[in-house]
Amino acid sequence: MPKSTSSDNSPPIPDDSPMAASPLLILIDGHSLAFRSYFAFAKSRQGGLRTKTGIPTSVCFGFIKSLLEVMESENPNAIAIAFDTKEATFRQQADATYKANRTETPEDFLPDVKNLQQLLQGLRIPVITSPGYEADDVLATLAHQAIDQGYRVKVVSGDRDLFQLVAPDKGITVLYLSGPFSRGSATVGPTEYGLEEVEAKLGVLPSQVVDYKALCGDPSDNIPGVKGIGAKTAVKLLKEYQNLDNIYASLDTIKGAVKKKLEVGKSDAEHARYLAQLRFDTPIDIDLDQCQLQGFDPQVLKPLLERLELKSFISQIDKLQQRFGGVVLEDIETSAPNDTVSDTVSNTDSDTDTQEDDDISFFSVAETEEFQEQGSNTGSIQPQIIDTVDKLNQLVEQLKYYTDAGNPVAWDTETSDLEPRDAQLVGIGCCWGKELTDVAYIPIGHKDGTNLDKDIVLESLRPILESSDYPKVLQNSKFDRLVLRCNGIQLAGVVFDTMLASYVLNPETSHKLSDLGLHYLGIEAQ
């Protein structure tokens, strides 16, 4: 099994060092970036981005847009992109359960990726695969070949498996896609991970990442690791013993249940280490000279862009040519054969969302001009304060009309404590429409101002809160459910949780409601 060659005690590369002047190779985890592009739009628009004829383009637009952003910020000399293949990998052959927990690939994702690869071919960017191996293995092999030939390497991915490649002393870092770009954020694009960033994220150094996964597993890849050993214990063991081999060589010094778990799970740890370790000897057939930016063929690229209705790229094709190191050519023929672009399901409605927004950056739909304009013109939300029983009764009657799961009512509880069982109910808020006044707040336990009796409020709301006929959206519904249960209400009908959705889309970013409102709606909490 190959060993990592990273050196974890090395300082970052100074800007004036000889290595800093070395040519830069950007390596991109193709499927990682493609999936992020797809889901950024698929969950925010009806069916994602499509042409007027129904061809899916979320992957193409998001991927190329993000590629250009990386090129703008990093100014690389060379680029290569690795993709997985449909063939079973050596890991799946060794363990049929490896990644068996992954959901089925969406139907319109694959034709979108096929079109993307045609676009990349038009841009003359190498797309590299190796049947039987994963894209991560291709990237690991390319990275080490590149540093041997005098390159610096930055790997673009949202996969933490690639943290094991990080070795700043050798010139390898990871541009980690930890969350969506947000205008107004201090962080633009991916975050560059060196030694300190990896340790801050996982608690271990890059050379310990494989052994970390061997101990506590990796649920995203369906690698169990040692049963009963969690992330905190794995970090503690690796800080004390440095690596897996030392841990097992020192079992006599480890006490209690941890020792027993390690003894029982030794074969599982070794198997997990084999699955987690990237390969540096992946068979690939490419010369790094082929990765140099050399311009593209407009007669191939421009017809594809037009067919896919990627208008913002078409309008900047001369600028693209310069960015990719080519010479601008005039009067390019733009006709394209009808079968150039892969289509998808043929019964797509013609009025589906047709195209991209010029300013979308790192997959934030809030970056569209429409969303930004909405955010800037929002004004002040004007909640109705429900401080009389008459107002409460009117609110209840109004909320009874909202029975469509496609238009649920948002609910929130205000409490005196973050521990649900100790919390006193201070107030209940709800929102049911798009107008600034479609918001209500019911004060129950405030020290100042008018409060309604809690029992009256809960009994009035009970028919709605306890019925699945009235769909509801909450932020951290588990908390609100417990708060209401402690107050005699069995919450039902929750169809969406914004905190959970934020976590699924971007586990590493902030899930606070105020941050989500600013990011997706351009509304700043007051």
Image: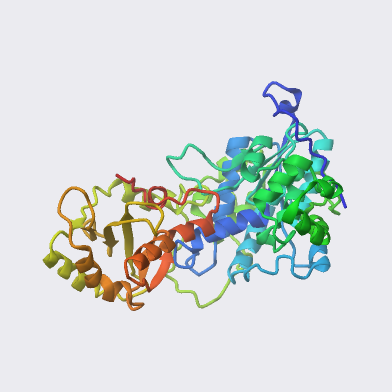
Q: Quadrant of residue 338?
A: bottom right
The residue drawn where x is 41% and y is 63% is 477
Which x, y percent locates residue 396? 21, 71
The residue drawn where x is 81% and y is 58% is 263
Near-viewer residue (394 or 149): 394
Q: Quadrant of residue 11?
A: top right
Which x, y percent locates residue 303? 59, 57
Looking at the image, residue 29 sits to the left or right of residue 433; the answer is right
The residue drawn where x is 38% and y is 51% is 517
Q: Inspect this view and state whether residue 422 appears.
A: yes
Looking at the image, residue 460 sits to the left or right of residue 39; the answer is left
> Given the current orientation, which residue lies at the most extreme front position?
256
Near-viewer residue (143 or 466): 466
Which x, y percent locates residue 328? 61, 40
Looking at the image, residue 246 sits to the left or right of residue 12; the answer is right
Split into 4 quadrants, where in the image is the C terminus? top left
Which x, y percent locates residue 495? 41, 70
Give the answer, above or below, for where 107 lies relative to 189: below
Give the answer, above or below, for where 303 lies relative to 522: below
Q: How is the image coloured?
A: rainbow
Q: Inspect this view and state whether residue 327 appears.
A: no
Near-viewer residue (402 or 29): 402
